[in-house]
Image (tube, rainbow, N blue to C red):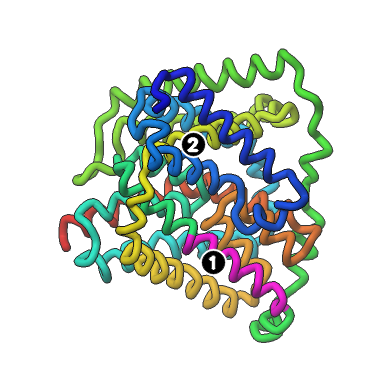
Amino acid sequence: MITETTQLFALLAGVLGLVFWLSTLPALSKFFKIMPPVIWAYFVPMILTTAGIIPAQSEVYSWMSRYLLPFSLFLLMITVDLRAILKLGRMAIIMMLVGTAGIVIGGPIAFAMFSSFLPADAWQGLATLSGSWIGGTANLVAMQASVGASSEVVGTIIVVDTVVGYGWMGILIFLSAFQDKFDRWVNADSSAIDRVNKHLVDAEQSQRPATLNDLTYILGLGFVVTVVAVAAGGYLPSLGDPTVISATTWGILLVVTVGLLLSFSPLKKLESAGASKIGFLALYLLLTSIGAQADLAAILEAPMYLVTGIVWISIHVGLLLIAAKIIRAPLFFVATGSMANVGGAASAPIVASVYHPSMAPVGLLMGISGYILGIYAALGCAWMLGQLSVML
């Protein structure tokens, strides 16, 4: 078993590098479109733990969870282009918000239906899943830290997230072949897509090679803000019974809020040097440690979690379809509005490009908006789940 801290960190970093290198191979491109590299950042360390190669508990994992999460969230928030998101258009934003509402209310409804078949700490697992389904992976990790979900519960939730979440993504990709029929059924206003396309900002044009100065600014600012926010969070009171907003949550909320405010400052220009890419790297490194703390034996508890997840996402889909009929939204906005929540910035551009190849940036912007909403909306969902766990 590899237990020495530096060796363990190096192994996790090596696993992440190997997974992303394999995803670049042409022979495996279709496979990784179905099962993105981020999933394997969870599963490969989970397999290594189950096989006894690495430990389920280590101070390396604790450090990564405490600091890499707020560090990555700060860099993702500081690079958000809120003006570009607002320019997406009324229809895109409405479908995004309806998708979020479907997750927030769907979780408590599904939990109330199946709570008697689930373990006592299931609400913590479902609260963690709400983070993933309102903005993607970064919010999953944030909600796990917020409610204190155990590694065993998170292992099960990863299975549900993969099977149900990415299963729904597969269905959306399949439905792209029928978007004309759907659009006729709702009498869709396709001019909205044209308006959105006119306002797209091609972020790649502003990219430039990062200099040493850029990297020192990004790392220095990111870690200083992270350490200060984490320390400040320790002085703020825990809220909720059971606890939903803990000292860890306060630290995350401070980081996210400060990052969003600074996104309107000149520091936003750090994105041209790839600040968000460093944020994603930190996030994916953190995911390897989350996977390492879980055990594949958790899959044995998955059946009722899977049923709960299916009902939950069905409520989300149902609300999106009702909203699409009312506001005459094309299937494109149903798909991207859903994936911006359920899959986040990693999956929304993929689904958007399947429907309209030139519209991948729309999916990306909607996915980024999911990160913003997720931190706040998922806390509301977690609070409702916590209250139901006491009542039921």
Eye-nearest disc, 2 or 1: 2
First of labels 2, 1 by sequence position: 1
Q: CA distance from mark 2 to mark 1?
A: 24 Å
Q: Position of residue 18 (x, y in %)?
A: 63, 36
Residue at 70% in and 47% down:
84
Residue with the mark numbered 1: 168
Left or right side of 99 for 172: right
The front one of 29 and 107 is: 29
The front one of 390 and 18 is: 18
Disc 2 residue type (three-letter): Thr
Tell me if residue 221 is in the magenta stretch.
no
Against 160, residue 221 (above or below) is above
Residue with the mark numbered 2: 288
Residue at 39% in and 71% down:
311
State the predominant SS element of the stretch in magenta. Answer: helix
Q: Position of residue 29 (x, y in %)?
A: 72, 53
Q: Position of residue 282 (x, y in %)?
A: 55, 30
Q: Position of residue 140 (x, y in %)?
A: 44, 46
Residue at 23% in and 51% down:
121
For the question of whether residue 176 can be seen, the reply is yes
Disc 1 residue type (three-letter): Trp
Against 133, residue 331 (above or below) is below
> For numbered disc 2, what is the local secondary structure?
helix
Q: Residues within 10 Å of mark 1 (few under 14, many from 20)?
A: many
Q: Which residues are magenta?
A: 163-179
Left or right side of 134 for 206: right
Q: Quarter-wise, where is residue 170 in the image?
A: bottom right
